[in-house]
Image: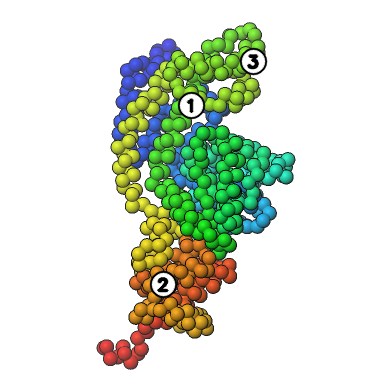
Amino acid sequence: MCLGKTLKLSDCCTPMAGKEMKNRGSKCLKEVHTVTEALKALYRQKLLPLEKYYGFSDFHSSSLEDADFDNKPMILVLGQCSTGKTTFIRYLLEQEYPGSRVGPEPTTNNFTAIMHGEIEGIIHGNALTVDANKPFRKLSPFGTSFLNRFQCVHLPNRVLESVSIIDTPGILSVAKRKMNRGYDFPAVIRWFAEHVDRIILLCDAHKLEISDEFSCSIMALRGNEDKLRVVLNKADMVDSQELMRVYGALMWSLGKVFCTPEVLRVYIGSFWSSPMRVTDNRKLFEQEEEDLFADIRNLPRNSALRKLNDLVKRARLARAHAYIIGSLKEEMPFVFCGGKKKRDLIYDLPVIYSRIQQRHQIPRGDFPDCAKMQEQLMSHNFKFKGLKPKLLGGLDELLNTDIAKLMPLLRQEEKAAEQLLMQGGLFLGSHMDPFIAGNPFHHSGSNGESALVSDEEWVVSKDKQEYDEIFYNLSPHEGKLSGTKVKNWMMSTHLPSSVLGRIWKLADVDGDGMLDDEEFALAGHLIEVKLEGFGLPRELPAHLVPPSKRPRKISATENRDNE
């Protein structure tokens, strides 16, 4: 009886059963409607079984979950202490987030995931690692010391509807390199680098030294250089000649750490909403900001392509890992001299790499770092499994056939996403060009009037006489100033163009691309508010709406006349 049952179970492993499973897998792939669904199906059917069989997660990254495929694009913001990481995020969101602090000392000591939520709040690290809807469950192996320094902030911000942002602790400087964080900081950076869509590495124009921890953190980014964007921040604090020297010194320092023949793209600017101190390079900073934010704005469009690219990269690494483990299994003796043979195999790992490369035609770039692999093998028990052609055949099919079948679906999604624009924060317009015809700061169209109009006195009235003098000195035509005439006056405040664009959008209440005397006074008032260090409102409050732009109330007498 037992034998009969065993034979029936073995029927599942027959070629016919394998063919049925393959057909069923192909059918499932045909039934998917999005690239993300297809990638999840391929991973579960063809890559995950191989990873489990060869212990991939023991040597490389942990297995993927649905949240890793379904999550929004993520941006990792990285840099040394006081390089402006938190300020950069505030500038991007045009909003502070709970727990954020800014100062010359290291104020950010947590990893903070800033994500969209209708209700503002904070979730701490230990709770995050058990939430199946968040892509952070695999962070628990980094231990309690890390989880106590990890949190998620929910914020009702329109930018966060499209992307999530990871703020990080400042990388320690040379003077503090001996301090112990209590967890493996470079390993955490490596985990995030593998899972995010973009890495923003901020450098300070006054802090170009490469500390030991900074160097280790950059090394942790290896393999993800395509996601990296380097930003030379606070560039408005130096003049043109000094900026040229700072830029050259930064490129030289980064070249020593990255050790690549390609020159890194470095964006130069000052990513905050305060007035520029040195305005010699204002035009350059605006162009650089436009390029960087255009790259960020396209992340939602390219999200499916990034996930596909990461899965292919993971599958290639898993294939190389399987052949390495299989080769080590073949070389190990069954009984005697296991310890000596283990040491010899670890020492000869570069030779094994070359042998696998030649025998199976695997590119050298698919192999894991040899030194790191040797270090991990030293602590392993070497109870490996041999090569399994069925698993490797499924993986080859994924790489050679299945991914190619997804390309038409990917192109369809990209075409459908051409109109998908990141909204909110600095991404209010249809593009980032700050000086288009009829509007000096890239915003166009009606701002809309507030539904609730206050009867309070207009707060700008007390300064309107002063603004009227400036208004008429600019020679208005038919009672209005064009954007061209207002532009130079607004730029004399040295505020960034993105901030001036927000002010223009708020002040141009009727949306005609011109300012009358009341709208001009309102613009001047908002500039003064910003120069005093306060934030700008998302929409124009009722008490700031100019009196002539407020809906006129109909009196009781007029109501009777109409009746």
Query: Which residue occupies the extreme front position in the image?
Result: 241
Q: Is mark 3 on a helix, strand or loop?
A: helix
Which quadrant is home to the N terminus?
top left
Instruction: Name the mark on residue 365.
Output: 1
Closer to the camera: disc 2 or disc 3?
A: 2
Closer to the camera: disc 3 or disc 1?
A: 1
Above-or-below relation of 395 to 260: above
Above-or-below relation of 313 to 508: above
Disc 3 marks a residue whose amino acid type is Arg
**Residue under numbered circle 2:** 485
**Residue under numbered circle 3:** 343
Q: What element carries label 1?
A: helix
Disc 2 to disc 3, C-alpha distance: 77 Å
Closer to the camera: disc 2 or disc 1?
A: 2
Disc 2 to disc 1, C-alpha distance: 57 Å
Residue 77 shows in the view: no
Mark 3 or mark 2, which is nearer the start of the sequence?
Answer: 3
Disc 1 marks a residue whose amino acid type is Gly
Mark 1 or mark 2, which is nearer the start of the sequence?
Answer: 1
Disc 2 marks a residue whose amino acid type is Lys
For label 2, count other residues whose C-alpha is less than 10 Å away and answer few (under 14), some (14-19) or many (20+): some
Above-or-below relation of 558 to 168: below
Residue 334 shows in the view: yes
Residue visible at 57% across and 24% down in the picture:
370
